[in-house]
Image (cartoon, rainbow, N blue to C red):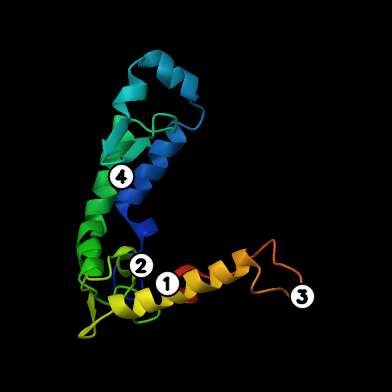
Amino acid sequence: MNADGRTRLDQTSEWTALAKHREEWADTRLRDLFDADPARGTGYTLRVGDLHIDYSKHLVTDETLRLLRELAAATDVFGLRDAMFRGEKINVTEDRAVLHTALRAPRDAVIEVDGENAVPAVHAVLDRMAGFAERVRSGEWTGHTGKRIRNVVNIGIGGSDL
Protein backbone atom coordinates (compact mmCIF):
# COMPACT_ATOMS: atom_id res chain seq x y z
CA MET A 1 0.00 0.00 0.00
CA ASN A 2 1.01 3.59 -0.64
CA ALA A 3 1.00 6.15 2.15
CA ASP A 4 -2.44 7.29 0.97
CA GLY A 5 -3.91 3.79 1.17
CA ARG A 6 -3.92 3.16 -2.57
CA THR A 7 -2.50 -0.06 -3.94
CA ARG A 8 1.05 0.36 -5.18
CA LEU A 9 1.34 0.53 -8.94
CA ASP A 10 3.63 -2.49 -9.11
CA GLN A 11 1.22 -4.58 -7.04
CA THR A 12 -1.69 -4.38 -9.47
CA SER A 13 -2.73 -7.12 -11.86
CA GLU A 14 -2.50 -4.54 -14.65
CA TRP A 15 1.19 -3.99 -13.86
CA THR A 16 1.77 -7.74 -13.86
CA ALA A 17 0.10 -8.01 -17.28
CA LEU A 18 2.25 -5.17 -18.61
CA ALA A 19 5.42 -6.79 -17.24
CA LYS A 20 4.45 -10.11 -18.85
CA HIS A 21 3.81 -8.32 -22.13
CA ARG A 22 7.26 -6.72 -21.90
CA GLU A 23 8.89 -10.12 -21.38
CA GLU A 24 7.10 -11.48 -24.44
CA TRP A 25 8.54 -8.66 -26.55
CA ALA A 26 12.01 -8.62 -24.95
CA ASP A 27 13.76 -10.05 -28.02
CA THR A 28 11.85 -7.96 -30.54
CA ARG A 29 13.81 -5.51 -32.64
CA LEU A 30 12.39 -2.25 -33.91
CA ARG A 31 13.41 -3.22 -37.42
CA ASP A 32 11.07 -6.23 -37.18
CA LEU A 33 8.18 -4.00 -36.11
CA PHE A 34 8.78 -1.65 -39.05
CA ASP A 35 9.09 -4.60 -41.45
CA ALA A 36 5.77 -6.00 -40.21
CA ASP A 37 4.06 -2.59 -40.42
CA PRO A 38 5.56 -0.16 -42.94
CA ALA A 39 3.04 2.50 -41.79
CA ARG A 40 4.30 2.28 -38.20
CA GLY A 41 6.08 5.63 -38.51
CA THR A 42 2.77 7.41 -38.97
CA GLY A 43 0.58 5.06 -36.93
CA TYR A 44 2.55 5.67 -33.74
CA THR A 45 2.94 9.39 -34.20
CA LEU A 46 0.66 12.17 -33.09
CA ARG A 47 0.59 15.92 -32.96
CA VAL A 48 -1.06 18.01 -30.27
CA GLY A 49 -0.71 21.69 -31.08
CA ASP A 50 2.99 22.31 -31.62
CA LEU A 51 3.94 19.10 -29.81
CA HIS A 52 5.00 16.24 -32.09
CA ILE A 53 5.18 12.84 -30.43
CA ASP A 54 6.78 9.92 -32.25
CA TYR A 55 6.81 6.73 -30.25
CA SER A 56 7.15 4.47 -33.29
CA LYS A 57 10.80 3.96 -32.42
CA HIS A 58 9.98 2.38 -29.08
CA LEU A 59 8.93 -1.18 -28.37
CA VAL A 60 5.26 -0.20 -28.31
CA THR A 61 2.37 -2.07 -29.87
CA ASP A 62 -1.38 -1.63 -29.85
CA GLU A 63 -1.43 -4.20 -27.04
CA THR A 64 1.12 -2.17 -25.07
CA LEU A 65 -1.08 0.90 -25.36
CA ARG A 66 -4.16 -1.07 -24.30
CA LEU A 67 -2.34 -2.40 -21.24
CA LEU A 68 -1.06 1.07 -20.35
CA ARG A 69 -4.61 2.47 -20.57
CA GLU A 70 -5.82 -0.31 -18.26
CA LEU A 71 -3.04 0.47 -15.78
CA ALA A 72 -3.91 4.17 -15.91
CA ALA A 73 -7.57 3.40 -15.23
CA ALA A 74 -6.77 0.98 -12.39
CA THR A 75 -4.54 3.50 -10.64
CA ASP A 76 -6.86 6.47 -11.19
CA VAL A 77 -4.32 8.48 -13.15
CA PHE A 78 -7.04 10.77 -14.52
CA GLY A 79 -8.54 11.36 -11.09
CA LEU A 80 -5.12 12.20 -9.68
CA ARG A 81 -4.43 14.48 -12.64
CA ASP A 82 -7.67 16.33 -11.99
CA ALA A 83 -6.85 16.58 -8.27
CA MET A 84 -3.44 18.02 -9.18
CA PHE A 85 -5.07 20.70 -11.33
CA ARG A 86 -7.42 21.52 -8.46
CA GLY A 87 -4.44 22.06 -6.14
CA GLU A 88 -5.30 19.13 -3.88
CA LYS A 89 -2.65 17.51 -1.71
CA ILE A 90 -1.72 14.49 -3.80
CA ASN A 91 1.88 14.32 -2.54
CA VAL A 92 1.05 12.28 0.53
CA THR A 93 4.69 11.84 1.54
CA GLU A 94 5.14 15.58 2.06
CA ASP A 95 1.42 16.23 2.72
CA ARG A 96 1.22 18.98 0.13
CA ALA A 97 -0.03 19.81 -3.31
CA VAL A 98 2.26 19.42 -6.26
CA LEU A 99 2.72 22.66 -8.14
CA HIS A 100 3.77 21.41 -11.57
CA THR A 101 0.78 23.18 -13.09
CA ALA A 102 1.54 26.44 -11.28
CA LEU A 103 5.09 26.41 -12.69
CA ARG A 104 3.65 26.58 -16.18
CA ALA A 105 0.62 28.74 -15.44
CA PRO A 106 0.34 32.31 -16.72
CA ARG A 107 0.64 35.04 -14.10
CA ASP A 108 -3.10 35.70 -14.10
CA ALA A 109 -4.05 32.05 -13.50
CA VAL A 110 -5.58 30.91 -10.23
CA ILE A 111 -4.52 27.61 -8.68
CA GLU A 112 -5.77 27.40 -5.13
CA VAL A 113 -3.82 25.48 -2.52
CA ASP A 114 -5.18 25.58 1.02
CA GLY A 115 -7.46 28.45 0.03
CA GLU A 116 -4.71 30.64 -1.44
CA ASN A 117 -3.72 31.26 -5.04
CA ALA A 118 -0.26 29.64 -5.41
CA VAL A 119 0.51 31.25 -8.78
CA PRO A 120 1.82 34.63 -7.50
CA ALA A 121 4.26 32.92 -5.09
CA VAL A 122 5.45 30.56 -7.82
CA HIS A 123 5.99 33.44 -10.24
CA ALA A 124 7.91 35.36 -7.56
CA VAL A 125 10.32 32.41 -7.32
CA LEU A 126 10.50 32.11 -11.12
CA ASP A 127 11.32 35.84 -11.32
CA ARG A 128 14.10 35.45 -8.72
CA MET A 129 15.47 32.46 -10.64
CA ALA A 130 15.42 34.43 -13.91
CA GLY A 131 17.19 37.36 -12.23
CA PHE A 132 19.85 35.09 -10.79
CA ALA A 133 20.36 33.36 -14.14
CA GLU A 134 20.74 36.73 -15.89
CA ARG A 135 23.32 37.91 -13.31
CA VAL A 136 25.31 34.69 -13.85
CA ARG A 137 25.08 34.97 -17.65
CA SER A 138 26.09 38.64 -17.69
CA GLY A 139 29.07 38.06 -15.39
CA GLU A 140 27.65 40.33 -12.68
CA TRP A 141 27.54 37.32 -10.35
CA THR A 142 30.90 35.58 -10.17
CA GLY A 143 32.28 32.51 -8.49
CA HIS A 144 34.38 32.49 -5.33
CA THR A 145 37.52 33.24 -7.39
CA GLY A 146 35.93 36.36 -8.85
CA LYS A 147 35.81 34.75 -12.30
CA ARG A 148 32.69 34.34 -14.40
CA ILE A 149 30.70 31.20 -13.75
CA ARG A 150 30.83 29.02 -16.84
CA ASN A 151 29.29 25.77 -15.60
CA VAL A 152 26.49 25.11 -13.14
CA VAL A 153 25.62 21.80 -11.52
CA ASN A 154 22.24 21.77 -9.79
CA ILE A 155 21.60 18.89 -7.45
CA GLY A 156 18.01 18.98 -6.31
CA ILE A 157 14.84 16.98 -6.16
CA GLY A 158 12.66 18.69 -8.69
CA GLY A 159 10.07 21.14 -7.48
CA SER A 160 11.34 20.95 -3.93
CA ASP A 161 14.10 23.35 -5.03
CA LEU A 162 11.39 25.99 -5.03
| Residue at image coords 30%, 49% | 14
| Residue at image coords 34%, 72% | 98
Could you say where residue 128 lies in the image, as x and y percent from the top left? 47, 76
Identify the amino acid type marked 2.
Leu
The residue where tag 1 is placed is 126
Relative to 79, does residue 31 appear above or below in the rendering?
above
Q: Secondary structure at mark 2?
A: helix
- Looking at the image, is mark 2 or mark 4 nearer the viewer? 2
Mark 4 or mark 3: which comes first in sequence?
4
| Residue at image coords 76%, 70% | 147
The residue where tag 4 is placed is 68
The residue where tag 2 is placed is 103
Q: Report the front residue among 32 and 113.
A: 113
Q: Secondary structure at mark 1?
A: helix
- Looking at the image, is mark 4 or mark 3 nearer the viewer? 3
Quadrant in the picture for residue 143: bottom right
Q: CA distance from mark 3 to mark 1?
A: 26 Å
Q: Which mark is residue 146?
A: 3
**Tag 2 near tag 4, CB within 8 Å:** no
Relative to 28, does residue 110 appear above or below in the rendering?
below
Q: Residues within 10 Å of mark 2 (few under 14, many from 20)?
A: some
Q: Report the front residue among 80 and 152.
A: 152
